[in-house]
């Protein structure tokens, strides 16, 4: 019979040690807790403990630097690293050093207990540490991801866990949320980092040319094919192929892409010989793929091939705590020393940003370039914001007209088609005003019925956050039936 497992905890914050100790003991584990790395290592060297949970910044030795020493004495020892500092680079560094997992602070106790259970159940996979020629661990050189919100910390943790995996990833999120930046980070923190990163936007390619674009073509394959052309799969050999706006790929090309993913080879258009492929696929979409599948516009089997690891990037309006850091990053990256006064930053945080990070970046760079004085004030920001399209009612969640989130636009269309046979004569340009004045309550009731009263799913389908949905349920007197 297996005895009680002992968890070694190291964190210089006594409150964190107390919370961890109590939670782990309630879950049936023994716990040894310390505020420094030296004591932690002493326990490990003396054969104490079955799992290590360590902070990064502690008196004396850094938690990440301890990992190779721990594995030098006890190669089988699993290590979970937790930190609130520099989440992405810390997460990746921890995994490269050999950590089993990374837990960003603040963390959820249930998530921690799941990590502990999984770590004790697994055999630790030794990870080869990869270093640059100058001896430093690799870092992002083409991308810079900004944000310490809980949602972004979760994404950093996923990227870190995939450092030594070659799995397909599907990145979802509204337009402008930074899906390609996440894709580049996945590539640059992977074993394929020395290979090419090739990006192709499905929505920007004429449908009849997509197969040629992806797989290449032989001379004479079609009218205008005057010479042999290498496709994106060949260009990405040994690296990563990023398929942006995958929801816009036509069904014929989807079928061929599925075959390539299944068989690991493709045939150029007009060619006869199959070509072996060695690429990692990262796809992205701003569309509701489940709705596309239901409508027969996207292959269910291809979706599961691409969605091995899902990453959802929340809209900027749901991670407003990241806006000050984003503003500073955009100012500095433009080579400027200008600053935004606190009231101006607060105004930026209060705006819903239907265009997400891309829209924020454009505004910050414009203000930085056009204003000759060093401090950008509240009035400057307000003047710019007044010129942007802002919603009249769903202030924190939707934009007017065609700016409605994709999921909500689809639902509104489906609602009117099913109940009235057509969209109102005003069309999408005036749809927001029409919905607010005539159909907001029945639309929300209809979505709640479809989700069987699940408010989380209903909010996601409507493209608004759960708190806003709850407010509207209360304001409109909607009865939620489960």
Image (tube, rainbow, N blue to C red):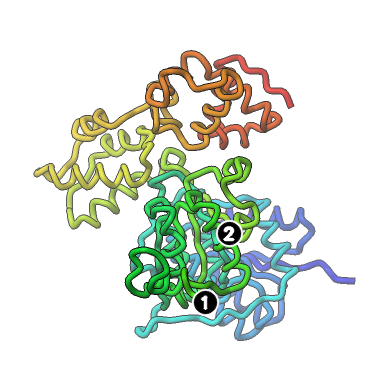
Task: Name which residue lies at 28% across and 50% down.
Answer: 328
Q: Can residue 237 be spotted in the picture?
A: yes
Pointers 1 and 2 in contact (C-beta within 8 Å): no
Q: Residue 77's spot in the image, x, y percent?
A: 67, 77
Q: Quickly name the residue at label 1.
A: 272
Corner quadrant of residue 425: top left
Residue 255 circle label: 2
Q: Residue 332's spot in the image, x, y percent?
A: 23, 55
Counting residues from the start of the chain, the first of labels 1 and 2 encountered is: 2
Vertical position of residue 6 compared to residue 130: above or below: above
- 70 vs 223, left or right, is right
Corner quadrant of residue 36: bottom right
Classify 10 Å Cα crowding around label 2: few (below 14), some (14-19), many (20 and above). Answer: some
Task: Name which residue lies at 54% across and 82% down.
Answer: 128
Q: Can residue 152 be spotted in the picture?
A: no
The local secondary structure at tag 1 comes to: loop
The furthest residue to the right: 1
Vertical position of residue 475 compared to residue 299: above or below: above
Identify the image quadrant of the N terminus. bottom right
Q: Residue 429's spot in the image, x, y percent?
A: 37, 25
Calculate the distance from the C-alpha at mark 1 to the C-alpha at mark 2. 18 Å
Viewer-side residue, 287 vs 257: 257
Viewer-side residue, 283 vs 395: 283
């Amino acid at each position: 019979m297996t005895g009680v497992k002992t968890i070694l905890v190291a964190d210089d914050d006594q409150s964190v040690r107390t919370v961890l100790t109590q939670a782990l003991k309630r879950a049936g584990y023994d716990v040894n807790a310390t505020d420094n790395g030296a004591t932690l290592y002493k326990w490990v060297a003396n054969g104490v403990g079955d799992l290590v949970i360590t902070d990064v910044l502690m008196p004396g030795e850094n938690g990440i630097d301890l990992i190779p020493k721990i594995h030098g004495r006890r190669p089988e020892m699993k290590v979970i690293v937790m930190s609130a500092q520099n989440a992405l680079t810390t997460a990746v560094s921890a995994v490269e050093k050999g950590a089993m997992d990374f837990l960003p602070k603040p963390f959820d106790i249930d998530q921690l207990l799941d990590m502990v259970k999984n770590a004790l159940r697994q055999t630790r996979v030794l990870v080869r540490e990869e270093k640059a020629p100058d001896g430093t661990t690799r870092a992002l050189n083409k991308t810079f991801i900004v944000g310490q919100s809980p949602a972004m910390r979760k994404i950093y943790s996923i990227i870190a866990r995939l450092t030594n995996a070659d799995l397909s990833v599907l990145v979802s999120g509204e337009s402008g949320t930074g899906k390609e930046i996440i894709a580049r980070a996945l590539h640059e923190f992977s074993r394929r980092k020395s290979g090419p990163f090739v990006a192709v936007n499905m929505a920007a390619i004429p449908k009849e040319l997509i197969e040629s674009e992806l797989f290449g073509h032989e001379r004479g394959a079609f009218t205008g094919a005057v010479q042999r052309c290498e496709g994106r799969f060949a260009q990405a050999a040994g690296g990563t192929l990023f398929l942006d706006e995958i929801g816009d790929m036509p069904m014929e090309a989807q079928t061929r892409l599925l075959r390539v993913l299944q068989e690991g080879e493709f045939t150029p258009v007009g060619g006869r010989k199959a070509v072996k492929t060695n690429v990692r696929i990262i796809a992205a979409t701003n569309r509701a793929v489940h709705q596309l599948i239901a409508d027969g516009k996207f292959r269910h089997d291809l979706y599961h091939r691409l969605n091995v690891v899902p990453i959802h990037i929340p809209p900027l309006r749901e991670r407003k705590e990241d806006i000050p850091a984003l503003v500073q990053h955009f100012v500095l990256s433009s080579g400027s020393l200008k600053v935004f006064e606190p009231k101006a930053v607060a105004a930026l945080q209060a705006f819903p940003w239907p265009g997400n990070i891309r829209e924020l970046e454009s505004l910050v760079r414009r203000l930085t370039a056009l204003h000759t004085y060093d401090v950008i004030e509240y009035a400057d920001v307000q003047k710019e914001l007044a010129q942007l399209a802002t919603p009249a009612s769903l202030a924190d969640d939707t934009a007017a007209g065609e700016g409605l989130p994709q999921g909500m636009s689809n639902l509104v269309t489906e609602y009117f088609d099913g109940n009235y046979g057509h969209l109102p004569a005003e069309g999408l340009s005036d749809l927001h005003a029409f919905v607010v004045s005539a159909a907001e309550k029945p639309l929300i009731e209809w979505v709640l019925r479809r989700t069987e009263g699940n408010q989380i799913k209903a909010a996601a389908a409507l493209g608004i956050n759960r708190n806003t949905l709850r407010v509207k349920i209360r304001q409109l007197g909607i009865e939620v039936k489960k």
